[in-house]
Image (tube, rainbow, N blue to C red):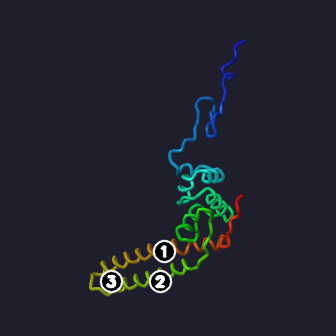
Amino acid sequence: MKPTQEALKMQLNLAKFQRNPGGDYNEYFMPSSIRMVLATMPEEELDDMAESNGRMFRYRFGFEATRTVRQQVIELREKYELSDGDIRWLKRAGHLRISRTGVTIDPSRLMPIAGWIQITLFSILCVAMIFQVAFSGAPEWKQGLGQTLVAILWFAGASLLFKCHIAPWNTLKRSGAIEFCPAPRE
């Protein structure tokens, strides 16, 4: 007796990211960029990859670290439900201190205070520029254009200063991560 064509079809899964739908073709998960990997993989797998692969950790969090520090950063992210971007901004703002042996959170209020002082001085400077444009002898449309450009400059500068100095502190306060001490690894 001859086996039918349907009985000869077989599906094999030879790798983790491969499947053979319907027996006609093979599908492989071969991302074209690291951004595709970050966008499509589950968090648990990304954490495992970042913990074991220093290049993946650097691309994901923006800095290089030893294996124990990578474990502590991932533990910090999971414990306080921080995003990858939050970790990056905490490091840039100086609130996340990285050494070869560990991670500490610096709860210094100096950065948000310095941020508010810089925003205040920048605002005073922009207000002075707006008044100078308003009292110049230029036509009205030029004054309006100048004041609009100064206002755009103020908004961009103030939002950048806020994001660099004040927002990371607010992130620490909201998450409750100010008193973070990583568990010692064996």
Vertical arrangement, residue 26 with respect to residue 164, above or below: above
Residue 103 position within the rendered picture, expressed as x and y whole percent measured from the top left: 62, 65
Q: First in sequence: mark 1 or mark 3? A: 3
Under mark 3, the amino acid is: Val
Secondary structure under badge 1? Answer: helix
Task: Report which residue position mark 1 lands on.
Answer: 161
Mark 3, other Cα within 10 Å: few <14 / some 14–19 / many ≥20: some
Residue 1 position within the rendered picture, expressed as x and y whole percent measured from the top left: 72, 12
Residues tagged 3 and 2 counted as in contact (Cβ below 8 A): no
Q: First in sequence: mark 3 or mark 2? A: 2
Q: Nearer the viewer, residue 147 or 122?
A: 122
- Please tell me the numbered disc located at residue 133: 3
Residue 23 position within the rendered picture, expressed as x and y whole percent measured from the top left: 62, 29
Task: Report which residue position mark 2 lands on.
Answer: 120
Under mark 2, the amino acid is: Thr
Residue at far bottom of view: 135
Q: First in sequence: mark 2 or mark 1? A: 2
